[in-house]
Image (spheres, coloured by chain):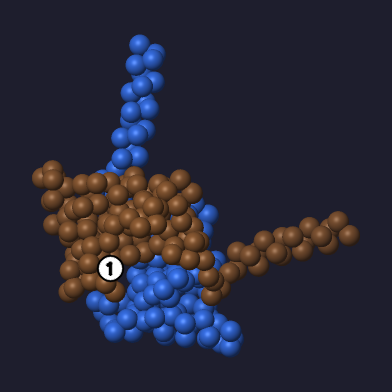
Chain colours: A brown, B blue
Amino acid sequence: MERIVLMYIDELKFDDNGLIPAIVQDYKTKEILMMAYMNRESLEKSLETKETYFFSRSRQCLWHKGETSGNIQHIKSIKYDCDGDTILIEVEADGPACHTGNRSCFYRSILDLSEDENKSILDNLYRRIE
Amino acid sequence: MERIVLMYIDELKFDDNGLIPAIVQDYKTKEILMMAYMNRESLEKSLETKETYFFSRSRQCLWHKGETSGNIQHIKSIKYDCDGDTILIEVEADGPACHTGNRSCFYRSILDLSEDENKSILDNLYRRIE
């Protein structure tokens, strides 16, 4: 691997389990697809292949996203934050990120004020029409 | 707090330290602004005030984003992922998310193929013009 890239990896802060959270975002729509964890090996493998590799905390092994489902994530960019303890990966995905078949793993809401806003805009429109 | 919201919080998986990672995204541009951690108290406070509260791991206390800088994040939506172990918050921010003054904490790249792509598109254009 190129020396400059290895230098970047050395700047990252992996936690006590050797992991760093990686946010995966669709590089075109900017939708957040999922969040998973990487260890140094999976990050190096991702940089090498330009496809996402994570470390599965439940199975305690390297996990090539899409290996069984076919929904490979092709990496467009990898950024890291000011603290160096989180990674952001932009991808072009061959299919849904979520095992439920949803494009994104974030398909459930606790709170949605944007909908309320849209609803109130619609309500206002209806009132004007009436 | 409403019963239905408390039910949602009960579905979330806080880690051994009582924390859950929260990704913060600009609700208009979809840019990822930062990632921080919430405990149950900070999530409840966020839901109550519609402003982001986190748990500072370094200072071990509740942290109201923007309290000192003025860069309050107004919550538009809160989603959670299929595993219930990550939160995604869409906000309208009064100012930069990062303490460095950058709009986003993710201002450094390890890899950027999108730039290469744009560069090669430009290179092709130049070649055609020549």
Task: Kindly indicate the quadrant of the structure image that contains residue B16.
Answer: bottom left
Task: From this view, report whether residue A63 is shown above or below residue A26.
Answer: below
The residue shown at (83%, 62%) is A127
Q: Chain of mark 1?
A: A
Residue B42 in the image, given as x and y percentages of width and height: 42, 81
Residue B125 in the image, given as x and y percentages of width and height: 39, 20
Task: Kindly indicate the quadrant of the structure image that contains residue B97.
Answer: bottom left
Q: Is residue A115 visible?
A: yes
Task: Kindly indicate the quadrant of the structure image that contains residue B113.
Answer: top left
Q: Amino acid at mark 1?
A: Ser
Residue A48 in the image, given as x and y percentages of width and height: 21, 47
Asked whether B18 or B91 is in front, the reply is B18
Q: Farthest residue toward the front?
A: A68
The residue labelled by disc 1 is: A56
Asked whether A49 or B16 is in front, the reply is A49
Secondary structure found at label 1: strand
Q: Is residue B98 visible?
A: no
Q: Farthest residue toward the right?
A: A130
Left or right: where A38 falls relative to A129: left
Q: For the residue carrying disc 1, how many other residues have a C-alpha within 10 Å: few (<14), some (14-19), or many (20+)? A: some
Task: From this view, report whether residue A45 is shown above or below residue B24.
Answer: above
Left or right: where A39 falls relative to B130: left
Quadrant the N terminus of chain B occupies: bottom right
The residue shown at (58%, 69%) is A112
Residue B122 in the image, given as x and y percentages of width and height: 36, 26
Q: Farthest residue toward the top?
A: B130
The residue shown at (23%, 62%) is A62
